[in-house]
Amino acid sequence: MTFLFYIFAALTLVGGIGVVVYKNPVSSAFAMILSFLGLAALFIQLDAYLVGILQILVYAGAIMVLFLFIIMLMDVKAEENKTFRGGAILGAILVMGGFAAALVKVLLDSRIGEGKLAPLAESEQSDVHAIGDLLFTQYWFPVQIVGVLLLVATVGVVVLSKKEMK
Amino acid sequence: METDLTLNHFLMISGLLFAIGLAGVLVRRNIIVIFMCLELMLAAANLSLVAFSRFGGENGMPNYDGQVLLFFIITVAAAEVAVGLAIIVALFRTRETTDVSDVTSMKN
């Protein structure tokens, strides 16, 4: 278990670094798919099966295909001979180092994160069943709101993509 | 299955992934890659949500409210990506560029 955690955590982080360092946006997109697959494996290790599968279907599947499709429409070659600016790299390393240092300090000082990953209790229900139950009872109204939001987004995208913007 | 994994392990990975995404937003000039790095930061936040959901439960069950929230986040993120990419396409159509340093009309 612990061994698998480190493998998938490394996969996630290497994918994330790949997104940042690859110059070609297509390579970045594939590194991002790698990162999302590792993340989905971490979700499944946390016994969140439904969310892990959703991560693969929605993020690694639908969203990344959308990204690749848009990259295809644009001029990738023009990007490749651009170099990173030194100031931006220095700033990014400073911000990233500061953030990571603050994170380590907080996690070491606080005691919230010390509990071990205990096995789940035996249950008749799968997590799909439990989440579905909550969605269609307690969270029914938010589900409707999200439905409206998706409709609004669809209409918005159609309006934005029309040739003539008035 | 006994494991040595704690909540800290997952929060650490989540924080590092967030930091990588943040660094990407600062370093990259291509607006599509910046958008991908934003998604990476969102996904990192999702990981800590699932971790808290798993460790914050009672009676040996995860706290499913967190996973329901994640379901909504994924839905809204999908809508957000669709709208964001449409805006990028509109930008490319009017300016013929995906480089953020070429988009400076708001700068005086």
Image: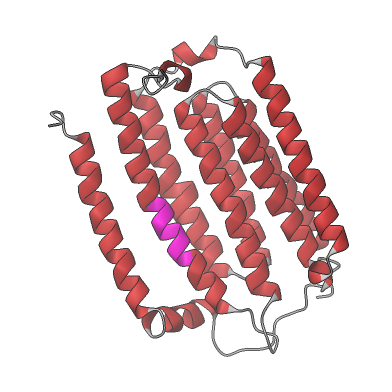
Q: How is the image coloured?
A: secondary structure
Q: Residue at x 29, y 59 (%)?
A: A149
Q: In the displayed structure, does residue A13 sit left or right of residue A2?
A: left
Q: Position of residue A32 (x, y in %)?
A: 56, 39
Q: Quadrant of residue B60?
A: bottom right
For residue A74, above or below residue A150: above
Residue A144 shows in this picture:
yes
Quadrant of the rendered structure where residue B22 is? top right
Q: Nearer the viewer, residue B69 or A35?
A: B69
Q: Residue at x 78, y 78 (%)?
A: A118
Magenta residues, as a range? B71-78
| Residue A9 percent across, percent down from the top left | 73, 50
**Looking at the magenta stretch, what is its main secondary structure?**
helix
Query: Does residue B4 appear left or right of residue A90 in this picture?
Result: right
x 49%, y 28%: residue: A26
**Magenta segment includes A18:** no
Q: Please state the total of marks drawn on the protein image.
A: 0
Percent of width and height locating residue B19: 68, 42
Is residue B77 located in the magenta-colored stretch of the structure?
A: yes
Q: Is residue A158 left or right of residue A95?
A: left
Q: Nearer the viewer, residue B52 or A102?
A: A102
Looking at this view, name the residue that lies furthest to the front. Answer: B108
Q: Compare residues A92 and B49 and report the one nearer the observer.
A: A92
- Quadrant placement of the C terminus of chain A: top left
Does residue A8 appear anywhere in the picture? no
Q: Quadrant of the N terminus of chain A?
A: bottom right
Against B96, residue A25 (above or below) is: below
Of A10 and B14, the residue lying toward us: B14
Whole-percent x, y for residue B100 in the image: 46, 22
